[in-house]
Structure formats: C-alpha cells, structure tokens
Amino acid sequence: MNISCSQRALWSLALGSILTLGFGTQASARDNPRDLAGEEEAEAEVGERENRKGRGGRQRAAAADQAAPRQDAVRQDAQHRQAAQHEAVRRNDAQRQPRQQVRPRQEVQRPQAEQLARHRGDQERAARQAVEARQAAHADRRDVEQRAARRQIEARQIAPRPQVVQGQQRRDDMRRPDNRKQQQRLSREQQEQRIRAERHRADRYHQSHTQRSQRAEHRARQLQQQRRMAQYRYEQQYLQRLRQQQTNWIARRYNPYNDQYFHTPASYRYSYGGGYRETNRYGADLMRQAVNFGYREGLRAGQADRQDGWRSDYRNSYGYQDASYGYDGYYVEQDVYNHYFRQGFQRGYQDGHSSNYRYGRRDNNGSYGMLAGVLSMILGLQVLN
C-alpha cells in the first residue's frame, strides 16, 4: 500500500494527540481524588435508593399478601349479608301475599256486612212504622166511628120525643145551654142550598185526587235520589191511607138528607182569614179531627227525618203540603181543614224530630193526640149565644 509522506505525518500526529489525551485524563484523575469519591458516593446513593425501592416493593407485596385474606373475608361477609337480605325480602313477600289475599276478601266482606246491617235496620224500622201505621189507622177508624155514633145519638136527640115532665126538661136545658138552639132545624130551602154547596165542594175535591197523586210520585223520586228512605216509607204509607180513604168514599152510599149536619144550625164561631166563620158541632168535630190527624202525621214525618239524619223542615214534607187526610169535602171548606191540619202537623213534626213531646201525648189505646189545652188554643172556638 503506497502511503505518501504527508499522510504518514498526519496519522502520526493524530495518534500522538490521542495518547496525550489519555495520559492527561489519568493524570487528572490521580491528581483529583475528591471527584472520584463523589462519583463513588453517587453510585452508592443510587444503589441505596434501588435497595430501598426493592425493600418497599417487598413490603408492599407482603402487605398485599396479608390484606388479600381480609378482603376475601370482607367480600364473603358482604355476600352473606346480601344473601340474607334477599332471603328476608323473599320471606316478607311470601308473608305479605296471604295478607294481601285476605285484605281484598275483608274489603269485599265489610261493605256486604254494612249493607246487611243497613238492610236489617231498614226492615226493623219498616216493621215498626207498619205497626204504628196500623195503630194509627185503627185510631182513625175509631175516631170516625165515634163521630158517626155521636151523629146518631144527636139525631135521636133531635127527633121528636114523648112529652117529659117539666122539671126534667128544665134540668136538661140547664145541662145544655144551647139545647134549644141545637134542636132548631133549618128550613127546607136552607137545607137544599147547603146540600148543593157541599156536594159541589166534595166533587171538586175528589176530582183533584189524580193531580195530587202525580205530585206524590214526583216527590217519591226526589226522596229516593236524596236517599231519605225513612221519609220515603212514611210518605208511601201516607199515600196508601189517602188511597184507602178515596176507596171508602167511592164505596159508601152517602145520603146527605140523612146527615144531621144539614139540619143543624151553627153553634160555634171561629177566627180564620182575618174574619169570623160559623159552624155547627159537626163542623167543630171535623176541625178537631184535622188538628189531631195533622199532629199524628207530623209526628211520623218528624221521626222519619230524624232517622234519616235530615234537618228539621216540616214544610218540606208531603203530608204538610197535602194536608187533606181525613177530609171528604163536607162540613168545612177545604182551605179551613188544610189550615188546621197543618197547625197540628207542625207541632207533631217538632215533637217527632226532637223526641220531646211538648204538644201531644199518647193515650191508653196507643194513639197520639194533641193536648186539650193546645187544641183549644189552636181552634179558638166560641159558643154562639
């Protein structure tokens, strides 16, 4: 290989520089031992750091190995608790299901029991009211019979009698101050005039029966909508008594010429409508009957509203609005009978609704009637001289 002299000179110079640098470095290292110690300390620190890291890792690994069983125990305990909760929920659901099945049965049975109790109560009240209605009808018939008996007795008294001794005649006159007045008879013309007027009034009253029945049906529907069943039953019984009264009127053979009312002049007067009117003892008896019949009907109506829990309102009762039970069109005008019937009805309703008998009492026969003092105050009858 041919190398020129200049190249050999360059290679020699480079090799010499390298050798010089190496020897210089060793010399500087020998000359500066402090730098060498620092390097050794740094290497030692690095080794110590690595050792600490190794020990920390081993400690962490050991701690992790020790914590693993505890975590497993905690995890198992949580699983056991969760399983116990699921089991408790399942048992509660199993226990709740029979109760839920029993509750619907109880909820179904409770309304049925309440409905049965209400039905029994309604039946008992209806039975009591039926008994009271029969007693009232019996009392009404007895009153009518007594009035008819009085008419017959009075008719016999008015008829011509054998001559009696003068002393006996005088004693009879003293017992009956208006005896001479009562024994006077109206003239034939007056009798005919009274009979025509009374017949016309009676026919007009009985022709209005259909219209009153229609009002009663409308009233019955209202009571059913308001669920006032006790008042509904009472008014149905009242209508039944009215129908029976109408049937009896049609069936009987009434001859006014045989009725002593048409032959007897007036013996009483009373205040009505801002003036005075007159009537005889038959008309006065009918007015007393109107007050007593009104009191009995008002007593039943008030008791029915009290059973229904309804407020006190006697004017809202059909019996008060109709006010014609016991009236057949004769003896007094219909408005007069209605007035005194309502006077008795109002007081009977107050006694029945409050269960405090202030205006009437029950007699030995079981029927109710107005107290004599109250009856006299309502009628205000005055004997004519």
Image (cartoon, helix red, strand yellow):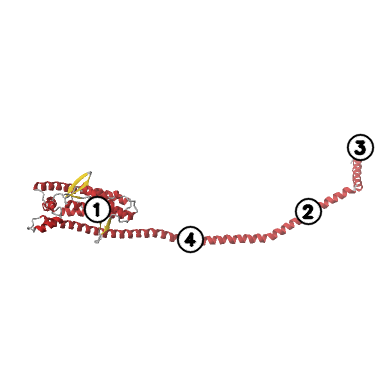
Distance from the alpha carbon under mark 3 to that under mark 2:
55 Å
Q: Can residue 229 be seen at all in this image of the molecule?
A: no
Q: How would you rate the neighbour count of disc 1 (Cα within 10 Å): few for under 14, some for 14-19, many for 20 or more?
A: many
- Asked whether the beta carbons under mark 4 and mark 2 sit within 8 Å of each other, the answer is no
- Asked whether the beta carbons under mark 3 and mark 2 sit within 8 Å of each other, the answer is no
* Comparing labels 1 and 2, the label whose residue is closer to the camera: 1
- State the image coordinates of residue 137 (x, y, percent, origin top left): 22, 57
Distance from the alpha carbon under mark 1 to that under mark 3:
172 Å
- Residue at left offset 89%, top offset 48%: 34
User: At label 1, which amino acid type do we have?
Assistant: Leu
User: At label 4, which amino acid type do we have?
Assistant: Arg
- Residue at left offset 84%, top offset 51%: 41
For numbered disc 2, what is the local secondary structure? helix
Whether residue 124 sits left or right of residue 332 in the image: it is right
* Comparing labels 4 and 1, the label whose residue is closer to the camera: 1
In this view of the protein, which residue sits in the foreground, 142 or 96?
Answer: 142
Q: Which mark is residue 375?
A: 1
Q: Give the quadrant of residue 236.
A: bottom left
For numbered disc 1, what is the local secondary structure? helix
Distance from the alpha carbon under mark 4 to that under mark 2:
66 Å
Distance from the alpha carbon under mark 1 to that under mark 2:
128 Å
- State the image coordinates of residue 86 (x, y, percent, origin top left): 54, 60
Q: Which mark is residue 6?
A: 3
Disc 3 or 2, which lies upstream in sequence?
3
Residue at label 4? Answer: 96
Q: How would you rate the neighbour count of disc 4 (Cα within 10 Å): few for under 14, some for 14-19, many for 20 or more?
A: few
